[in-house]
Amino acid sequence: MRRAVCPGSFDPVTNGHVDVITRAATLYDELVVAVLVNPGKAGLFSVDERMELLREAVADLPNVRVDSFEGLLVDYCRGHDIPVIVKGLRAVSDFEYELQMAQMNRELAAVETLFVPTAPQVGHLSSSLVKQVAKFGGDVSRLVPKAVDERLRERALREAGS
């Protein structure tokens, strides 16, 4: 069975993430979308909320499973017998950083990395930009899955009322 992992913070998941996940899912028998647990960083959404939003966003992809991990990604890969990491690339600046990570992951655990360039229509998306636009009341409905859009609006209203 061909298996891969697509890791990230996904805070929140964007249509760019969904693009990469959908395309990677066609290449593997099982694709695990793994949410990074970073205890030192408070996200807009909890890890459980991010996993729930991801599950909704990829519900139509039967070979995709959502999980979480803490620590080194290569340790997660070794523990789950996953030989490939899938990473989306938006720009050259992404490549420079991700190439170093790919080389280190290969050195540490012989885990390969597959780079998937984002589709041009979603290449500008990042979770940080989406959160910033939503925070100021901008319309992000075309940038994120429907469930994320609804949650972002709820969160923005709640924070505005605080």
Image (cartoon, grey):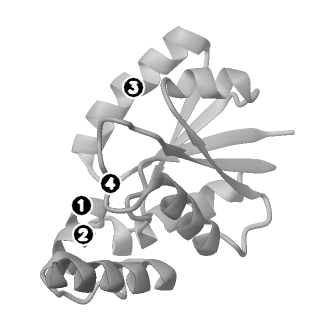
- Contact flag, marks 1 and 2 (Cβ < 8 Å): yes
Q: Which residue is mark 1?
A: 128
**Helix or strand or loop: what does disc 2 sit on?**
helix
Given the current orientation, which residue lies at the most extreme top position?
107
**Residue 102 x/y as whole percent:** 45, 26
Q: CA distance from mark 4 to mark 2?
A: 11 Å
Q: Which residue is mark 3?
A: 101
**Helix or strand or loop: what does disc 1 sit on?**
helix
* Label total for image: 4
Q: Which residue is mark 2?
A: 131
4 vs 2, front mark:
4
Of callouts 3 and 4, the N-terminal one: 4
- Contact flag, marks 2 and 3 (Cβ < 8 Å): no
Q: CA distance from mark 1 to mark 2?
A: 5 Å
**Residue 147 x/y as whole percent:** 50, 82
Q: Amino acid at mark 2?
A: Lys
Q: Residue at x 62, y 41 (%)?
A: 5
3 vs 4, front mark:
4
Q: Nearer the viewer, residue 14 or 156?
A: 156
Q: CA distance from mark 1 to mark 4?
A: 11 Å
Q: Which residue is mark 4?
A: 43
